[in-house]
Image (cartoon, grey):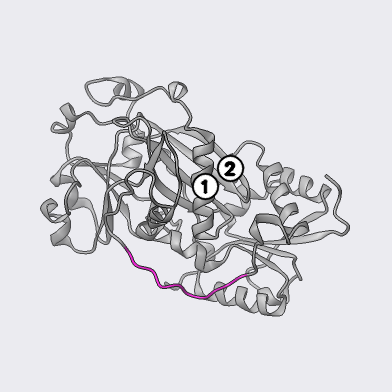
Amino acid sequence: MAEPTRRVGVGYALAPKKQQSFIQVSLLNLARSRGIDLIRIDTNKPLVDQGPFDCVLHKLRGEDWKKQLEDYSAKYPNALIIDSPEAIERLHNRISMLEVVSELKIENETESFGIPKQIVIYDWDTLLDPCAWGEGLKFPVIAKPLVADGSAKSHKMSLVFNKDGLSKLKPPIVLQEFVNHGGVIFKVYVVGDYVKCVKRKSLPDVSEEKLGSLEGSLSFSQVSNITTSERNDDKYYEMMDLEDADMPPQSFITDIARGIQRVTKLHLFNFDVIRDTKIGNRYLVIDINYFPGYAKMPSYETVLTDFFWDVLNKKETALGNLQVISCEKEARKLVGNNACEGTDGPLPVSPLSREETENPIQV
Protein backbone atom coordinates (compact mmCIF):
# COMPACT_ATOMS: atom_id res chain seq x y z
CA MET A 1 0.00 0.00 0.00
CA ALA A 2 1.41 3.38 -0.98
CA GLU A 3 2.47 5.88 1.64
CA PRO A 4 0.10 8.83 2.15
CA THR A 5 1.21 12.11 0.60
CA ARG A 6 1.25 13.83 3.98
CA ARG A 7 1.38 12.87 7.63
CA VAL A 8 -1.94 12.77 9.44
CA GLY A 9 -2.71 13.12 13.12
CA VAL A 10 -5.09 10.96 15.17
CA GLY A 11 -5.79 12.48 18.55
CA TYR A 12 -6.87 9.91 21.14
CA ALA A 13 -8.81 10.63 24.32
CA LEU A 14 -9.02 7.48 26.43
CA ALA A 15 -9.33 6.66 30.10
CA PRO A 16 -6.00 5.65 31.70
CA LYS A 17 -6.65 1.89 31.69
CA LYS A 18 -7.87 1.92 28.11
CA GLN A 19 -4.90 4.01 27.05
CA GLN A 20 -2.49 1.65 28.78
CA SER A 21 -3.88 -1.42 27.03
CA PHE A 22 -4.55 0.06 23.60
CA ILE A 23 -1.68 2.49 22.97
CA GLN A 24 1.19 0.03 22.68
CA VAL A 25 4.61 0.90 21.25
CA SER A 26 3.98 -1.65 18.50
CA LEU A 27 0.83 0.24 17.42
CA LEU A 28 2.52 3.64 17.60
CA ASN A 29 5.47 2.47 15.49
CA LEU A 30 3.39 0.73 12.82
CA ALA A 31 1.07 3.71 12.49
CA ARG A 32 4.03 6.08 12.30
CA SER A 33 5.56 4.02 9.51
CA ARG A 34 2.33 4.54 7.54
CA GLY A 35 2.35 8.31 8.03
CA ILE A 36 -0.11 8.29 10.95
CA ASP A 37 0.83 9.98 14.22
CA LEU A 38 -1.17 8.93 17.28
CA ILE A 39 -1.25 11.92 19.64
CA ARG A 40 -2.55 11.91 23.21
CA ILE A 41 -5.25 14.46 23.94
CA ASP A 42 -4.78 16.24 27.28
CA THR A 43 -8.19 15.87 28.94
CA ASN A 44 -7.28 18.59 31.44
CA LYS A 45 -7.26 21.17 28.64
CA PRO A 46 -10.06 22.21 26.26
CA LEU A 47 -10.09 19.97 23.19
CA VAL A 48 -10.67 22.94 20.90
CA ASP A 49 -7.27 24.36 21.92
CA GLN A 50 -5.42 21.19 20.88
CA GLY A 51 -4.43 19.77 17.52
CA PRO A 52 -5.65 20.31 14.93
CA PHE A 53 -6.26 16.61 14.40
CA ASP A 54 -7.40 14.89 11.24
CA CYS A 55 -9.31 12.44 13.43
CA VAL A 56 -10.39 12.27 17.07
CA LEU A 57 -10.56 8.77 18.56
CA HIS A 58 -12.31 8.67 21.93
CA LYS A 59 -13.94 6.62 24.63
CA LEU A 60 -15.00 9.16 27.23
CA ARG A 61 -18.44 10.10 28.54
CA GLY A 62 -20.28 13.04 30.04
CA GLU A 63 -22.01 16.19 28.84
CA ASP A 64 -18.83 18.24 29.10
CA TRP A 65 -16.94 15.91 26.78
CA LYS A 66 -19.83 15.79 24.34
CA LYS A 67 -19.90 19.61 24.25
CA GLN A 68 -16.14 19.68 23.66
CA LEU A 69 -16.54 17.38 20.65
CA GLU A 70 -19.31 19.57 19.27
CA ASP A 71 -17.15 22.70 19.65
CA TYR A 72 -14.19 20.97 18.04
CA SER A 73 -16.28 19.78 15.11
CA ALA A 74 -17.60 23.33 14.61
CA LYS A 75 -14.06 24.73 14.51
CA TYR A 76 -12.63 21.89 12.39
CA PRO A 77 -15.56 20.62 10.28
CA ASN A 78 -13.34 18.28 8.24
CA ALA A 79 -12.07 16.41 11.31
CA LEU A 80 -13.46 12.90 11.72
CA ILE A 81 -14.92 11.99 15.12
CA ILE A 82 -14.89 8.25 15.80
CA ASP A 83 -17.60 7.66 16.90
CA SER A 84 -20.61 9.91 17.57
CA PRO A 85 -21.51 10.12 21.29
CA GLU A 86 -25.20 9.75 20.41
CA ALA A 87 -24.50 6.50 18.56
CA ILE A 88 -22.34 5.19 21.40
CA GLU A 89 -24.95 6.08 24.03
CA ARG A 90 -27.37 3.49 22.69
CA LEU A 91 -25.03 0.76 23.92
CA HIS A 92 -25.05 2.10 27.48
CA ASN A 93 -28.50 0.66 28.15
CA ARG A 94 -28.84 -3.13 28.05
CA ILE A 95 -32.33 -2.94 26.57
CA SER A 96 -31.71 -0.41 23.80
CA MET A 97 -28.42 -2.20 23.15
CA LEU A 98 -30.09 -5.44 22.10
CA GLU A 99 -32.99 -3.65 20.41
CA VAL A 100 -30.41 -3.16 17.67
CA VAL A 101 -30.67 -6.87 16.83
CA SER A 102 -34.42 -6.62 16.23
CA GLU A 103 -33.74 -4.04 13.51
CA LEU A 104 -31.45 -6.28 11.46
CA LYS A 105 -32.62 -7.53 8.08
CA ILE A 106 -30.59 -10.64 7.26
CA GLU A 107 -31.59 -13.63 5.18
CA ASN A 108 -30.00 -16.98 5.89
CA GLU A 109 -31.33 -20.42 4.96
CA THR A 110 -29.46 -22.47 7.57
CA GLU A 111 -28.81 -20.28 10.61
CA SER A 112 -31.11 -18.07 12.67
CA PHE A 113 -30.39 -15.43 15.27
CA GLY A 114 -32.06 -13.35 17.95
CA ILE A 115 -31.62 -12.31 21.57
CA PRO A 116 -32.47 -14.06 24.85
CA LYS A 117 -35.78 -13.29 26.53
CA GLN A 118 -35.27 -10.43 28.92
CA ILE A 119 -37.07 -7.83 31.00
CA VAL A 120 -36.03 -4.67 32.80
CA ILE A 121 -37.29 -4.42 36.39
CA TYR A 122 -37.49 -1.10 38.22
CA ASP A 123 -39.03 -2.04 41.59
CA TRP A 124 -38.69 -4.64 44.32
CA ASP A 125 -42.26 -5.96 44.11
CA THR A 126 -41.88 -6.98 40.47
CA LEU A 127 -38.40 -8.36 41.07
CA LEU A 128 -39.54 -10.67 43.85
CA ASP A 129 -42.62 -11.92 41.94
CA PRO A 130 -41.51 -14.16 39.02
CA CYS A 131 -45.15 -14.41 37.93
CA ALA A 132 -45.00 -10.73 37.00
CA TRP A 133 -42.03 -11.17 34.66
CA GLY A 134 -44.05 -12.17 31.66
CA GLU A 135 -44.38 -15.36 29.68
CA GLY A 136 -41.35 -17.48 28.95
CA LEU A 137 -38.83 -16.09 31.45
CA LYS A 138 -37.92 -18.68 34.08
CA PHE A 139 -34.98 -19.76 36.23
CA PRO A 140 -32.09 -19.76 35.84
CA VAL A 141 -31.71 -16.12 34.83
CA ILE A 142 -28.77 -13.78 34.50
CA ALA A 143 -29.11 -10.51 36.43
CA LYS A 144 -27.35 -7.55 34.83
CA PRO A 145 -27.37 -3.85 35.78
CA LEU A 146 -29.52 -1.83 33.36
CA VAL A 147 -26.70 0.64 32.77
CA ALA A 148 -23.78 -0.69 30.72
CA ASP A 149 -21.38 2.24 30.92
CA GLY A 150 -18.16 0.28 31.34
CA SER A 151 -17.87 1.01 35.06
CA ALA A 152 -17.06 -1.74 37.56
CA LYS A 153 -20.62 -1.51 38.89
CA SER A 154 -22.10 -2.21 35.47
CA HIS A 155 -20.20 -5.51 35.33
CA LYS A 156 -21.58 -6.89 38.60
CA MET A 157 -23.67 -9.75 37.24
CA SER A 158 -25.15 -12.85 38.82
CA LEU A 159 -26.51 -16.21 37.76
CA VAL A 160 -29.74 -16.66 39.71
CA PHE A 161 -31.05 -20.20 40.22
CA ASN A 162 -34.27 -19.57 42.18
CA LYS A 163 -36.39 -17.00 43.98
CA ASP A 164 -34.10 -16.98 47.02
CA GLY A 165 -31.33 -15.51 44.90
CA LEU A 166 -33.38 -12.45 43.97
CA SER A 167 -33.02 -10.78 47.38
CA LYS A 168 -29.39 -9.91 46.69
CA LEU A 169 -30.25 -7.90 43.58
CA LYS A 170 -30.88 -4.17 43.36
CA PRO A 171 -33.26 -2.60 40.80
CA PRO A 172 -33.19 -1.24 38.18
CA ILE A 173 -31.92 -4.48 36.76
CA VAL A 174 -32.25 -6.59 33.65
CA LEU A 175 -33.18 -10.25 33.99
CA GLN A 176 -32.12 -12.28 30.97
CA GLU A 177 -32.86 -15.94 30.38
CA PHE A 178 -29.85 -18.21 30.75
CA VAL A 179 -29.48 -20.31 27.62
CA ASN A 180 -27.26 -23.39 27.74
CA HIS A 181 -24.53 -22.79 25.17
CA GLY A 182 -21.91 -25.43 25.79
CA GLY A 183 -19.71 -23.19 27.91
CA VAL A 184 -18.48 -21.31 24.84
CA ILE A 185 -19.00 -17.71 23.77
CA PHE A 186 -18.05 -16.19 20.43
CA LYS A 187 -16.64 -12.69 20.60
CA VAL A 188 -16.84 -10.79 17.33
CA TYR A 189 -14.53 -7.78 16.90
CA VAL A 190 -15.46 -5.16 14.32
CA VAL A 191 -13.06 -2.46 13.09
CA GLY A 192 -14.57 -0.66 10.12
CA ASP A 193 -14.81 -3.30 7.39
CA TYR A 194 -12.80 -5.86 9.38
CA VAL A 195 -14.65 -8.63 11.25
CA LYS A 196 -12.88 -11.18 13.47
CA CYS A 197 -14.61 -13.94 15.45
CA VAL A 198 -12.84 -15.75 18.31
CA LYS A 199 -14.11 -18.25 20.86
CA ARG A 200 -13.72 -18.01 24.62
CA LYS A 201 -14.85 -20.01 27.64
CA SER A 202 -18.13 -18.93 29.16
CA LEU A 203 -20.53 -19.96 31.92
CA PRO A 204 -20.97 -23.73 32.11
CA ASP A 205 -24.32 -25.26 31.19
CA VAL A 206 -26.85 -25.83 33.97
CA SER A 207 -28.69 -29.14 33.73
CA GLU A 208 -32.44 -29.33 34.41
CA GLU A 209 -31.85 -32.20 36.83
CA LYS A 210 -29.59 -30.24 39.15
CA LEU A 211 -31.24 -26.81 38.90
CA GLY A 212 -33.45 -27.58 41.91
CA SER A 213 -30.49 -28.39 44.13
CA LEU A 214 -28.57 -25.19 43.38
CA GLU A 215 -28.95 -22.50 46.00
CA GLY A 216 -29.79 -18.84 45.50
CA SER A 217 -27.37 -17.20 43.12
CA LEU A 218 -23.71 -16.89 42.26
CA SER A 219 -21.88 -13.79 41.14
CA PHE A 220 -19.88 -14.26 37.96
CA SER A 221 -16.69 -14.05 39.99
CA GLN A 222 -17.91 -16.90 42.19
CA VAL A 223 -18.79 -18.99 39.15
CA SER A 224 -15.32 -18.40 37.74
CA ASN A 225 -13.75 -19.62 40.98
CA ILE A 226 -15.39 -23.04 40.79
CA THR A 227 -12.60 -25.59 40.70
CA THR A 228 -11.79 -27.47 37.52
CA SER A 229 -12.90 -30.76 39.04
CA GLU A 230 -16.27 -29.27 40.00
CA ARG A 231 -16.74 -27.81 36.54
CA ASN A 232 -16.09 -31.18 34.96
CA ASP A 233 -18.30 -33.05 37.43
CA ASP A 234 -21.51 -33.93 35.61
CA LYS A 235 -23.30 -33.81 38.96
CA TYR A 236 -22.87 -30.05 38.97
CA TYR A 237 -22.15 -28.48 35.58
CA GLU A 238 -21.73 -29.81 32.09
CA MET A 239 -19.15 -28.01 30.00
CA MET A 240 -17.94 -28.44 26.48
CA ASP A 241 -14.22 -28.34 25.76
CA LEU A 242 -13.44 -25.06 24.04
CA GLU A 243 -11.40 -26.81 21.36
CA ASP A 244 -14.39 -28.95 20.39
CA ALA A 245 -16.62 -25.96 19.67
CA ASP A 246 -17.26 -25.30 15.98
CA MET A 247 -17.03 -21.69 14.89
CA PRO A 248 -20.18 -20.09 13.47
CA PRO A 249 -20.17 -19.58 9.68
CA GLN A 250 -18.00 -16.57 8.93
CA SER A 251 -20.40 -15.19 6.32
CA PHE A 252 -23.28 -15.37 8.82
CA ILE A 253 -21.31 -13.57 11.54
CA THR A 254 -20.13 -10.96 9.03
CA ASP A 255 -23.72 -10.30 7.95
CA ILE A 256 -24.71 -9.67 11.58
CA ALA A 257 -21.69 -7.41 12.08
CA ARG A 258 -22.55 -5.40 8.96
CA GLY A 259 -26.17 -5.15 10.10
CA ILE A 260 -25.24 -3.86 13.56
CA GLN A 261 -22.89 -1.37 11.92
CA ARG A 262 -25.65 -0.07 9.65
CA VAL A 263 -28.14 0.33 12.48
CA THR A 264 -25.79 1.85 15.05
CA LYS A 265 -23.53 3.79 12.66
CA LEU A 266 -20.59 2.67 14.81
CA HIS A 267 -17.23 1.57 13.47
CA LEU A 268 -15.41 0.26 16.56
CA PHE A 269 -17.31 -2.34 18.58
CA ASN A 270 -17.63 -6.00 19.41
CA PHE A 271 -20.58 -8.23 20.14
CA ASP A 272 -20.93 -11.51 22.02
CA VAL A 273 -22.79 -14.46 20.52
CA ILE A 274 -23.75 -17.84 21.95
CA ARG A 275 -25.09 -20.94 20.22
CA ASP A 276 -28.24 -22.44 21.74
CA THR A 277 -27.39 -26.08 22.46
CA LYS A 278 -31.06 -27.08 22.06
CA ILE A 279 -31.20 -25.58 18.57
CA GLY A 280 -27.74 -26.01 17.15
CA ASN A 281 -28.14 -23.55 14.28
CA ARG A 282 -29.66 -20.76 16.39
CA TYR A 283 -27.40 -17.98 17.69
CA LEU A 284 -28.18 -15.35 20.31
CA VAL A 285 -26.54 -11.94 20.56
CA ILE A 286 -26.19 -11.19 24.27
CA ASP A 287 -24.01 -8.08 24.45
CA ILE A 288 -22.64 -5.25 22.29
CA ASN A 289 -19.71 -3.13 23.49
CA TYR A 290 -18.16 0.03 22.10
CA PHE A 291 -14.37 0.16 21.59
CA PRO A 292 -13.56 -3.16 23.32
CA GLY A 293 -10.16 -4.53 24.34
CA TYR A 294 -8.68 -4.69 20.85
CA ALA A 295 -5.18 -5.39 22.15
CA LYS A 296 -6.39 -8.95 22.86
CA MET A 297 -7.25 -9.41 19.19
CA PRO A 298 -4.59 -11.08 16.99
CA SER A 299 -2.59 -8.53 14.93
CA TYR A 300 -4.63 -5.66 16.31
CA GLU A 301 -1.89 -3.18 15.36
CA THR A 302 -2.24 -3.96 11.66
CA VAL A 303 -6.04 -3.99 11.78
CA LEU A 304 -6.30 -0.61 13.52
CA THR A 305 -3.58 1.01 11.41
CA ASP A 306 -5.33 -0.12 8.22
CA PHE A 307 -8.56 1.35 9.59
CA PHE A 308 -6.96 4.72 10.34
CA TRP A 309 -5.32 4.78 6.91
CA ASP A 310 -8.58 3.99 5.15
CA VAL A 311 -10.73 6.58 6.90
CA LEU A 312 -8.10 9.32 6.61
CA ASN A 313 -6.93 8.72 3.06
CA LYS A 314 -10.09 7.41 1.42
CA LYS A 315 -12.78 9.52 3.04
CA GLU A 316 -14.86 9.60 -0.10
CA THR A 317 -15.23 5.82 -0.27
CA ALA A 318 -14.19 4.29 3.04
CA LEU A 319 -16.82 2.89 5.37
CA GLY A 320 -19.76 4.31 3.50
CA ASN A 321 -18.70 7.92 3.91
CA LEU A 322 -17.80 8.10 7.60
CA GLN A 323 -19.30 11.38 8.71
CA VAL A 324 -18.11 14.02 11.11
CA ILE A 325 -19.87 14.08 14.43
CA SER A 326 -23.62 14.48 14.58
CA CYS A 327 -25.14 14.95 18.02
CA GLU A 328 -28.79 15.17 17.03
CA LYS A 329 -30.88 13.21 19.48
CA GLU A 330 -33.08 10.40 18.25
CA ALA A 331 -36.30 9.32 19.91
CA ARG A 332 -36.07 5.71 21.05
CA LYS A 333 -38.39 3.30 22.81
CA LEU A 334 -37.18 0.79 25.38
CA VAL A 335 -38.72 -2.59 24.73
CA GLY A 336 -38.63 -5.12 27.50
CA ASN A 337 -38.92 -8.68 26.27
CA ASN A 338 -38.30 -9.02 22.55
CA ALA A 339 -36.59 -12.02 21.03
CA CYS A 340 -36.13 -12.16 17.26
CA GLU A 341 -37.43 -15.42 16.00
CA GLY A 342 -36.01 -16.78 12.78
CA THR A 343 -33.94 -14.43 10.69
CA ASP A 344 -36.23 -11.39 10.70
CA GLY A 345 -34.71 -8.38 12.22
CA PRO A 346 -31.66 -6.38 11.81
CA LEU A 347 -24.40 11.69 36.19
CA PRO A 348 -22.03 13.99 36.32
CA VAL A 349 -18.75 12.15 36.81
CA SER A 350 -15.31 12.65 35.45
CA PRO A 351 -15.22 10.93 32.06
CA LEU A 352 -11.90 9.42 33.02
CA SER A 353 -13.59 7.43 35.78
CA ARG A 354 -15.43 5.35 33.19
CA GLU A 355 -13.57 2.33 31.89
CA GLU A 356 -14.54 -1.11 30.71
CA THR A 357 -13.86 -4.10 32.93
CA GLU A 358 -13.79 -7.55 31.37
CA ASN A 359 -15.16 -10.47 33.36
CA PRO A 360 -13.15 -13.66 33.73
CA ILE A 361 -16.30 -15.50 32.69
CA GLN A 362 -17.87 -14.13 29.52
CA VAL A 363 -21.61 -14.09 29.00
Residues at discs 1 and 2 in contact (Cβ within 8 Å) = yes
The quarter holding residue 325 reads: bottom right
Give the magenta-colored segment's residue range.
325-334
Number of numbered markers: 2
Q: Nearer the viewer, residue 219 or 159?
A: 159
Residue 212 in the image: x percent, y percent? 13, 33
Circle 1: residue type: Ala
Can you tell which mark lies on residue 195? 2
Q: Which residue is mark 1?
A: 257
Q: Is residue 259 above or below residue 79?
A: above
Q: x%, y% of residue 350?
A: 51, 69
Q: In x, y percent, where is residue 10?
A: 73, 60
Decide which of tag 1 and tag 2 comes sooner along the chain: 2
Q: Which residue occupies 38% across, 49% down?
A: 344
Does 93 sit above or below residue 358?
below
Of residues 261 and 112, the one drawn nearer to the viewer in this rendering: 112
Magenta: predominant secondary structure element? loop
| Distance Cα–Cα, label 1 vs label 2 | 7 Å
**Residue situated in front as seen by the camera: 36 or 230:** 36
Left or right of 273, for residue 189 = right
